[in-house]
Each structure stands twice: as structure tokens, then as C-alpha cells.
Amino acid sequence: MKVLNDLLGYENLQLYQDDTMFSFTLDSILLARFINFNKRMTKIVDFGTNNGVIPLIISRYTTAAITGVEINSQAVVLAQENMSLNELNHQVKIVNDDIKVFAKKNIHGFDLVVCNPPFFEVGEKTKTRETNPLMVDARHETLINLAEIIQSASLCLNNKGVFVMVHRAQRTGEIIELFHQYHLVVKRLRFVYSKSKYEAKTVLIEGQKQGNKGVEILPALIAHNDDETYSDEILEFFRD
């Protein structure tokens, strides 16, 4: 069922979501707000854009041309509707394609690649058992794996271009190894915790194509207070 929602605290931003497909989570917000925009970023691509939530958010912080790539044709229609709804067709283009294929057609074509990928390996057990194939593909590496995502990002990036991704904290070592393999240098890291007493849940990571050595490890980001409400810092990310 397709439902129209306000996009959290972003004034005048709305989006359609379909409860039969993957809906956006806090990870998408944090990833979008983790990006350090600069004037050199004139062409941006969002891998696995789903309903287009990340292009919607980042359009508030950049005038760059944005492309959202999505393999699921149903999600593509939804993302295109969201761009029209928010009058962003002049800035955001939604492409129905496999990320791996798209990357080979757009070598050195972008200054920034953004991705909120499937977190789980094929066959890995999760707390939620998915039976809907669309949800399985969104959460598991059935159509593309971590190495293929990072390789595709590297192909798409110009020299000194930036790749920004959110992923499970426990896969950080694997991510760093793959960055090195595909000529991306880790430049910024930030771990996200559900609460201060828990282990890190996710990691926000930025890499630069053929970048110089040196990484900035940012302070821990705590998502929730003990009473389950969002922390003050998280609430700031919801404000336009």
C-alpha cells in the first residue's frame, strides 16, 4: 500500500512509501547528513536509491545534478513520483539499472557516490524473517554484494572523488580492506550507537579515490536516550 508521508522535520518535503517495499530508516538520514559537500561536487549518484529519500534530502544542501540508480522497477516508479511531488525533476534523475552495469557505463562520471546498501550476506540470519522478495533483496546481498558496491563506486568516481556509505559496524574491517583494494582511502569514520551503553550498531564511512593518507575518526553518535527518545544530536539532523 502506497502512503504519503512528511519527511520528518524537512519543511515542504514529502514522499510516497510502499509498505510492500523497504521504507527508509534513520540510516538514510544519517548518511545524507554525513556528507561534506563542496563546490567540486557537481555530479552525484545514489546507489540503490529505492524511493529516492536520499536524493530528496541532499537536494537541500547542494545544487549538483543527482542521479538515483535502482534495479527494482516498482521502486523506480515511486522514486520518480517523489521527485515530481517535490518539484525536483530539474535536479534529480532516477535510472532503472543494475548498479554493476551502470558503473561500467559511467566510468569516472561522478564526483560523489552515496550508498545505503543491503547490510546482510546471503543466508545470514536476521531478527526479522523476510518472505517478501523485494524486502529480501533490499536487506540481503542477493543482487549485489559489498565488494561489488565498492568496486562500482570506485569505477564511477573521478580522481579524488568521494564515496560515502553507511553499513553495519561489525563489517568495518572488511569495508576498509575493500576500500584499499579498489583504490579508496578512508578519510572519515563515525560509529553510531543505539544507546551509550551498547556496542556500535552502524558505521558512517567516507573514502576518497586515490586520496592522501590520514583518517578523521569523529565522536560517537548516540541515537537514543535511555527512555527511547531520539538524542538531541539526532533531532538536529531532522531539522532542515
Image (cartoon, rainbow, N blue to C red):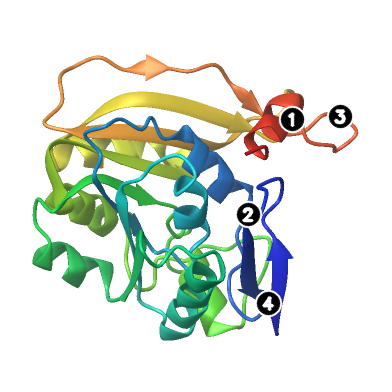
Q: Nearer the viewer, mark 2 or mark 3?
A: 2
Left or right: 1, with 208 as reference point: right
Labels 4 and 1 touching (C-beta < 8 A): no
Residue at left offset 41%, top offset 84%:
73
Count of numbered tags: 4
Residue at left offset 49%, top offset 44%:
60
x and y, in percent, of residue 35 in the image: 41, 35
* SS type, badge 4: loop
Kind of residue indicated by mark 1: Lys
Task: Say the numbered circle drawn on residue 226.
Answer: 3
Kind of residue indicated by mark 4: Asp
Which residue is tagged 2? 25
**Which of the two discs, 2 and 1, labels the residue nearer the N terminus?**
2
**Which of the two discs, 2 and 4, labels the residue nearer the N terminus?**
4
x and y, in percent, of residue 213 in the image: 18, 17
Calculate the distance from the C-alpha at mark 2 to the C-alpha at mark 3.
20 Å
Calculate the distance from the C-alpha at mark 2 to the C-alpha at mark 1.
17 Å
x and y, in percent, of residue 15 in the image: 62, 66
Labels 1 and 3 touching (C-beta < 8 A): yes
Kind of residue indicated by mark 3: Asp
